[in-house]
Image: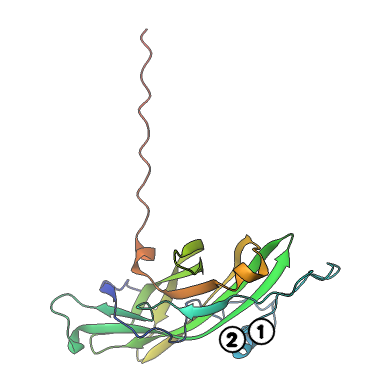
Amino acid sequence: MRKIAGLIVLSIAVAGCSAGGVRDASSGSESSPGITDRISSFFSTGGSSRPQRPAGQPPLEEEIDCPSVTVREGASTLTVRTGGEPSAMTLRYQGTIGRTARECKVVARTLQMKVGMEGRIIMGPAGGAGSLDVPLRFAVVREGPQPVTVITKTYRVPVTITAGASNVPFVQIDEDLTFPLPAAQELESYVVYVGFDPEALKRPEPRRRRAVPRRKG
């Protein structure tokens, strides 16, 4: 399968649209029956707004809400074009975001979040069969006069488009967005932002080895 070479850019989008992600939800093995149903249930219910406590762990002294998930402004649409002047006819693929979901679990005064997003790659006039990596970012941010990024992760999710397909769905789920559990009042300002981010496609530069001076013999 050839690799799609195209210019990937973020289009200006309206804030507040729902979010989506990218991994084949049906890639589980036969030894894990019901995995597709569990993923569907996760998104259909939106996850849980209340943290789940492991069996045997005493109840928390205070009930807390699981941070909400929203699509970051300007990151709800992905555009893949051919070279040349941008136009409707140079559009190869467009990525959109659908449902989001989250669950929380409190363990040893840390909050472990499971965050998922669904999305779709839509074929454009210049599109065709092939494969591409969809760049995504999940970030937990403490909002306020001076927002603070608590944790952020990027993903390169492979998507394969077969001949004749007009669109392809994708799913990305991160089961380990973990950070120290703040006070309940402070946690109210926490938001999980999701969206497309071309920075995720950039490979880190290799570290240069420090030259070791030779010993004089």
Q: CA distance from mark 2 to mark 1?
A: 9 Å
Q: In the rendered view, does 9 fall on the left or right side of 136?
A: left
Of residues 159 and 21, the one drawn nearer to the viewer in this rendering: 21
Q: Which residue is mark 2?
A: 43
Q: Residue at x 66, y 84 (%)?
A: 38
Q: Quadrant of residue 8?
A: bottom left
Q: Quadrant of residue 121?
A: bottom left
Locate the C terminus and report the quarter of the image it occupies. top left
Q: Is residue 45 above or below residue 137?
A: below
Q: Residue at x 37, y 31 (%)?
A: 210
Task: Residue type at mark 2: give it.
Answer: Phe
Q: Position of residue 85 (x, y in %)?
A: 13, 79
Q: Earlier in the sequence, mark 2 or mark 1?
A: 1
Of residues 130 and 117, the one drawn nearer to the viewer in this rendering: 117
Q: Residues within 10 Å of mark 2 (few under 14, many from 20)?
A: some
Q: Which residue is mark 1?
A: 38
Q: Secondary structure at mark 2?
A: helix
Could you tell me if the residues under marks 2 and 1 are in contact, i.e. CB atoms within 8 Å?
no
Q: Position of residue 5 (x, y in %)?
A: 27, 71
